[in-house]
Image (tube, rainbow, N blue to C red):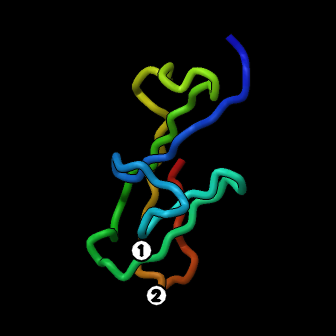
């Protein structure tokens, strides 16, 4: 099998895209963006990526998906300080 690779991003297990609230993902720019006034989102959170071939969307990567953790803090105290721990 070969072809174009596509992927989906999940935040805390929920699919995210340009229409999601709080955390959005732009597949064209390959960028995450976050905005929320919900203090329950503060802390360490999980982002996952699931890859698959566009022509075979039902054939997904086997678990575990590619994961990283992000730390969400109060941006008023430290603007633009979201990081992915190594």
- For this orientation, the residue located farthest to the front is 55
Q: Looking at the rendered structure, which numbered label has been put on residue 73? A: 1
Where's the N terminus, which quadrant? Answer: top right
Whole-percent x and y of residue 75?
47, 82
Is residue 70 rendered to the left or right of residue 43? Answer: right
Q: Quadrant of residue 18?
A: bottom right
- How many C-alpha atoms fall within 10 Å of the one at disc 2: few (<14), some, or many (≥20)? few
- How many C-alpha atoms fall within 10 Å of the one at disc 1: few (<14), some, or many (≥20)? some
- For this orientation, the residue located farthest to the left is 40
Q: Secondary structure at mark 1?
A: loop
Residue at 63% x, 23% y: name it.
Answer: 55
Residue at 63% x, 29% y: name it.
Answer: 54
Whole-percent x and y of residue 5?
67, 30
Is residue 35 rendered to the left or right of residue 37? Answer: right
Residue at 46% x, 54% y: name it.
Answer: 16
Question: Which residue was labeled with disc 2?
Answer: 77
Q: Nearer the viewer, residue 31 or 81?
A: 31
Is residue 55 rendered to the left or right of residue 48? Answer: right
Whole-percent x and y of residue 40?
26, 72
Q: Secondary structure at mark 2?
A: loop
Q: Nearer the viewer, residue 76 or 33?
A: 33
């Amino acid at each position: 099998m070969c072809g174009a690779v596509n992927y989906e991003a999940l935040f805390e297990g929920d699919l995210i895209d340009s229409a999601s609230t709080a955390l959005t993902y732009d597949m064209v720019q390959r960028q995450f963006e976050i905005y929320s006034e919900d203090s329950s989102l503060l802390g360490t959170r999980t982002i996952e990526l699931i890859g698959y071939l566009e022509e075979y969307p039902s054939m997904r990567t086997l678990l575990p998906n590619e994961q990283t953790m992000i730390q969400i803090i109060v941006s008023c105290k430290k603007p633009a300080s979201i990081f992915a721990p190594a």
